[in-house]
Amino acid sequence: MPKTRIIGDVHGLVSNYKLKALKNFNGPSIQVGDLGVGFAGDEDRDEYFDKIHKNGNHRFIRGNHDNPEVCKKIKGYIQDGTIEDDVMFIGGAWSIDGPNAPWGSPFGRVEYIDWWKNEECSDDQFKKFLSDYQHVKPRVMITHDCPAKVSKEMFFGSGLRKGSIYKNKTSGWLDEFIKVHQPDFWFFGHWHISYKYKYGNTYFVCLGELDFIDVDLKNSEKIHKSVSKGY
């Protein structure tokens, strides 16, 4: 089986996505959200992403900086809650710079322009996803964000990030996931730092912007070798 390339946030950098993350790579890829889809006035960019994904090899979940409705129209979109074999996918996250943040939007994000109220999955969706997760007990998770407890240790406890971690729906719900089952591996983006961390029995692998790692998703032993080599 060919290895799958897992790619960090793209943030609309179409050329870099194609020329860096996908250059000379003919296997399947999964991008972990914040592709940069659906921003008002950037319809040409959406079409370009659609063309890159047209052969079906390249797929993505949504991030908080993706328009959820436009994502559904782009080839290769993986719907929230999808389970393939023993790999589960959940997109979306909370925007620290969005207009619903307690301090407002310091970057002037505007709903329907570059911010979307349904950037996170709903509580009802998370309840359904958690039920499926408990039943399937996936071996691998691919999400945009990670559990709050993990990010607190992984980034703030290590000194990679300073300040406070803010409670939000997505990371709070993902805390519930890790309580009931610890998958072998959990890949995510959102934090813009390439770093790996073992929490309990799970290796968490964060991918920075346009960084990537090639793994055999069907074999945990081979994933471990790839993660151990670094990226």
Image (tube, rainbow, N blue to C red):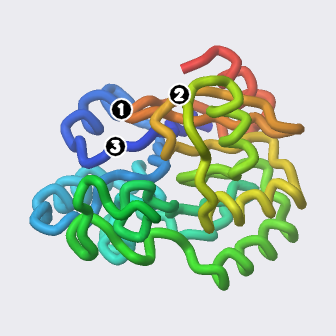
Q: Amino acid at mark 2?
A: Ser
Residue occupying the point 66% across, 42% down: 151
Q: Amino acid at mark 1?
A: Ala
Residue occupying the point 87% across, 57% down: 179
Q: Is residue 178 visible?
A: yes
Relative to 47, is 222 on the left or the right? Answer: right
Residue occupying the point 25% across, 54% down: 107
Helix, strand or loop at mark 3: loop
Q: Mark 2 vs mark 1: which is more N-terminal?
A: 1
Q: Quadrant of residue 132?
A: bottom right
Q: Residue 92 appears at what percent x and percent y?
A: 50, 63
In the figure, 178 relative to 19: above or below?
below
Residue behind mark 1: 21
Quarter the N terminus occupies: top right
Q: Residue 186 appears at what percent x and percent y?
A: 69, 44
Which callout, 2 or 1, points to the residue nearer the camera?
Answer: 2
Task: Please tell me which residue lies in front, 5 or 114.
Answer: 114
Residue behind mark 3: 10
Task: Please tell me which residue lies in front, 149 or 188.
Answer: 149
* Residue at mark 3 to residue at mark 1: CA–CA distance: 9 Å
Residue behind mark 2: 194
- Counting the numbered discs, the total is 3
| Identity of the residue furthest to the bottom in this view | 124
* Residue at mark 2 to residue at mark 3: CA–CA distance: 14 Å
